[in-house]
Amino acid sequence: MTAIIAGRYLVSSGGFAWLSARRHPHIHVGRGEQIRREIAWSLASAVVYGLPAGIVAWGWQAQGWTLIYDDLHAYPSWYGPVSVLAFLIAHDAWFYWTHRWMHRPTPFRIAHAVHHASRPPTAWAAMSFHPIEALTGAVVIPALVFMIPIHWGALLVVLGIMTLMGVTNHMGWEMFPRRLIDGPIGRWLITASHHQQHHRQYRCNYGLYFRFWDRLCRTDHGLGRFDHDRHAGAGTLSSLGDGHAER
């Protein structure tokens, strides 16, 4: 499982890092040391993620412990999308509160500072965590398969969305059109424009998939626009708060 997770990371982060360099040729200039550090921490995180994932895979196949099922007719057809949404909502809630806790002085200094050492982050930073922080992220999906029934195919969809969001939210530019992220859907979904604001201001925009908890807890500091400087070779973000900021 560690090898699978590491391979998934290298393919997904590597692919979007390549796309980033194609789209913004100067985005990685002068950041080789940072990228090497991001890859090293991410591969270490793959080991942490691999252990609970391996236990779940064994428990499902050999012991039947989990609520993962393979019969498409075991539940109504509408349940598949609902189970995916339930996993995402639960994961998002867990991520918001553990992420916010990680910004308290002690856990930040011990663990979360590793992730924020990437200034600004690249696509390689998707899993760049201290092992303590990696552990808080590694247990949530394995725990949910013991609580919420889900088809293995739907579980793959959840893992795919988790990977996509983790990588694209850190790659330093916005791949979605502004009309989407500035529209009704974008007001509730997190994209790179929203998460980059977190890496600039630290004490805001803690969510993973949805902006619900940030809005409810008044930690949503809005969206921004990337302005890629050809000479500096880095993406900067001009704040365009959407009226929900708590300054």
Image (cartoon, rainbow, N blue to C red):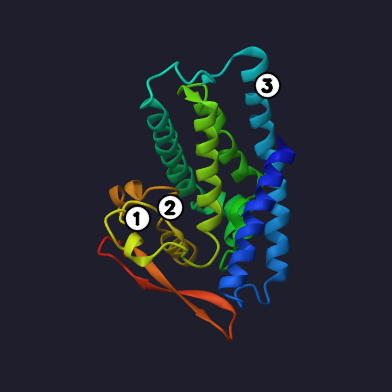
Residue furthest to the bottom in view is 231
In the rendered view, tell whether residue 137 sits above or below residue 34.
above
Alpha carbon of mark 2 to alpha carbon of mark 3: how far? 33 Å
The mark closer to the camera, 2 or 3, is 3
**Residue at disc 3, secondary structure:** helix
- What amino acid is found at the position of numbered circle 2 in the picture? Tyr
Asked if residue 56 is positioned above or below residue 123 in the image, the reply reads above
| Mark 2 nearby-residue class (10 Å; few <14, some 14–19, many ≥20) | many
Q: What's the mark number on residue 58? A: 3
Residue for badge 1: 219
Tags 2 and 1 touching, CB below 8 Å: yes
Instruction: Give the number of marks.
Output: 3
Which type of secondary structure does the marked residue at label 2 adopt? loop
Report the Cα–Cα distance between label 1 and label 3: 39 Å
- Mark 2 in CB contact with mark 3 (< 8 angstroms): no
Residue 84 vs residue 4: left or right? left
Q: For this rendering, which residue is in front, 162 or 117?
A: 162
- 224 versus 64 height, above or below: below
- Residue 140: % across, % down: 53, 34
Q: Nearer the viewer, mark 1 or mark 3?
A: 3
Answer few, some or many: residues within 10 Å of disc 3's Cα (few below 14, many 20 plus, some between 14 and 19): some
Query: Seen in the image, is 188 located left or right of residue 234?
Result: left
Q: Quadrant of residue 232?
A: bottom right
Q: Nearer the viewer, residue 110 or 215?
A: 215
Where disc 1 sits, the SS reads loop
Give the residue number, with chain letter if any, for mark 2: 206
The kind of residue on which mark 3 rests is: Trp
Mark 1 and mark 3 lie on one chain; the one further toward the N terminus is: 3
Q: Quadrant of the N terminus?
A: top right
**Residue positioned 54% across, 60% down in the render:** 170
